[in-house]
Every structure is written in structure tokens, then in C-alpha cells.
Image (cartoon, rainbow, N blue to C red):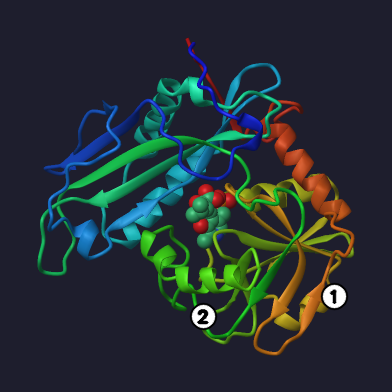
Amino acid sequence: MNIPDLDWKNLTFSYTKTDYNVRCTYKDGKWGEIEVSDSEYLPLHIAASCLHYGQESFEGLKAFRGKDGKVRIFRMEENAKRFIRSAEGTMMAPMPVELFCEMVRKVVKLNERFIPPYGSGASLYIRPFEIGISPLIGVKPASEYMVIMLVTPVGPYFKEGFKPTKVCMSREYDRVAPKGTGSIKVGGNYGASLVAGEKAHSLGYSVMLYLDPKEKKYLDECGAANFFAIKDNKYITPYSESILPSITNMSLVELAKDLGMEVERRQIPVEELKTFEEASACGTAAVCSPISEVHDLDTGEKYVFSTDGKAGEVTTKLYNKLRAIQYGEEPDTHEWCEILEVD
Ligand code: PLP
Ligand code: COI
């Protein structure tokens, strides 16, 4: 295998060209064969519904090169199920779970030389996405769709990695509407979050922590990651209809239970931030990204969780446990990883 000349230990969360992507088209009411492409471009009709009316959804998952040299893909069935929900929420054709998984396996295998080596701390990010491709001018669902999966080797999402960062919140911005598309992973949500995200960055924060869009009283989520906090040996994470159910969060909940912690998924009033011992963002890209402080831009209130530049004890334990399972250092007792047969 011709290993690419990349600085694996210093990869950022950004796009690097790999060898192939895979594509599958839905036409005449059915999915076609999986096609392999070495082009980074798509032939697309100028009136395609994805370009005008936002018929687009995406996923994000990772493959890891383990301590034993094996390649592990983390919980891809969960991404496949969420991909179906996103398709249904935007009137696109849902891709069956098995076809989704077959495409993931194929695109990882085809780009095996880009899976970062064990010990680099990096992983192969897999980005499936679906688009409406039929030409439309009236606002209605397309009849033809395409699912494309690309991969790219990545390092940490926040440049600080596992070092705590400051986040901010503001009642001036909503990521999504109360009964809108927050619980599915559609491109429009991210377009709508760019102004708030750039505002947070420009003020020196890593991300905007959104409040619930209806009452602006409860914590929702942190940009493209869920939020969790630790208090009195409890793992506490928001219940909200407008957040994306995170597969990482779902996994950390199980790991917290394994550690004998209680788990609470409920509305979290902003003022409760005062009482938390630890706070963190979590997601596929973010893994666990500890939060040192939350600044309320509207009231000037500051909530501080860490002053020594270190993540809290429980967050560190959960992070290490998750990484150990993903890199095959500890038994995968929940059977979250699929070991990919690479020939
Ligand atoms: N919330 C949002 C808005 C996201 O975009 C993501 C990333 O996918 C997450 C949460 C984390 O979800 P997951 O852990 O499934 O990647
Ligand atoms: C992920 O965590 O996989 C994401 O999709 C986050 C972001 C890059 C959109």
C-alpha cells in the first residue's frame, strides 16, 4: 500500500483529497448500483432541487485504525437510521440501512491508505450526503436523488483538541425553529448557523451554545455538537425537540452508566449552569470537547468550569473510554464497532 505523505499527528478537521468516492442514484422508484468515482466533482442540473430548495442531508461518522492494526467503523447503523429520518424530513428517498452500510464499507476500503495510523490520534471521517437532483422550478420534492460518500482523514474539530475552550450563548440567534428541522441533519440548519458561529469565533469563542428556540430558557446544543454536564456523579444532557440526537452522546450515556453514574436527559435551565462541576460538547467530529467557561453575551454572566486548562475528571474518563473502544484498546462490550475486512 502506497501510504500518503501526510503529517498524521497534526491533521486538522479539514478536507484532504482521497482516491475515490462512491455514488448511488435513486431513479424510477429504486436505488441503482453503487458506482465508484475518482472525480471530486458532480455533474448537476442547474435546476436541481438541492440547489434551490435545500433537498440535502448529510451524515458524519468515522473509521479508526486500531492498536491491533484492524479497521473499525463506529456505529454506522445508527448513522444509517438517522440518514433515513433526515430523508423523510425533507421528502427525499430514504436509503435502506444495508445499502448505506455497504457504501460505507466500500468507500473506506477503497481509501484504506488514507486511514490514519494508530497512535496519530487521527481518524478517517466519512461524509455521506444525499441530494435531490431532478430539475424543478416549482417547490416540490424531486423524483431523483443521489447519495454520495466521500472520506477524508481528520484530526480534532476544535483546534485545541481535548483542551477546554470557552463558548458563548446569546438569545439573538436560533439554529432552528421549535418544530423545525433541528432533530435531523440537513444542510439548511448549518447554513442558518453560520452567522452565529462566526460571531462566536470573532469574539474568541470556539462555538455558540444555543438555547431552546421557543422559550430561550433551556440549553439546546453547541454548534455541531450536543452538550452534557456532570454534577454529583450524574451525566446530565438536554432533552429538546430541536437538537440533533447525537450518536456520540448516546454512547457516552451508556459509558456513564457503565461507570455507575446516573443519567438525566431533561430540560436544563440556563441558571443551572452555575451548579455544574464539568461541561462538554460531544459529537463525531468534536468527540468530547470540554468547556472551560460559558459566557452569556446578553447578561454578561460567566459560568466557569475549569481554570487550570484541564478537562474535568469524569469527562476525561468518558473520553478515554470512548477512544479506547474506537481504537480497539479495550473490549467493545456494547458491540459498537464493525471490524472491516480489508484484503
Ligand atoms: N448536533 C449537531 C447539530 C451536529 O451536527 C452533530 C454532528 O453530527 C452532533 C450534534 C453530534 O452528533 P453525532 O455524535 O451523531 O456526530
Ligand atoms: C460531525 O460531528 O460529524 C459533524 O457532522 C459536525 C460538523 C462537521 C457538521
The residue located at (47%, 36%) in the rendering is: 152
Task: Assign a secondary structure to mark 1.
Answer: helix
Which residue is labeled 2 in the image? 173
The residue located at (31%, 56%) in the rendering is: 56
Query: Residue 41: percent from the left, percent from the top?
Result: 25, 39
Q: Real-space Cα distance between discs 2 and 1?
A: 25 Å
The residue located at (23%, 65%) in the rendering is: 53
Which residue is labeled 1 in the image? 275
In the image, taking residue 91 as reference, residue 113 lies left or right, namely right
Please, what is the three-letter code of the amino acid marked with disc 2? Answer: Tyr
- Up/down of 22 relative to 209, above or below: above
Please, what is the three-letter code of the amino acid marked with disc 1? Answer: Thr
Task: Assign a secondary structure to mark 2.
Answer: loop
Neighbours of disc 1 within 10 Å: few (<14), some (14-19), many (20+): some
In depth, the one of 191 and 28 nearer the eye is 191
Q: Earlier in the sequence, mark 2 or mark 1?
A: 2
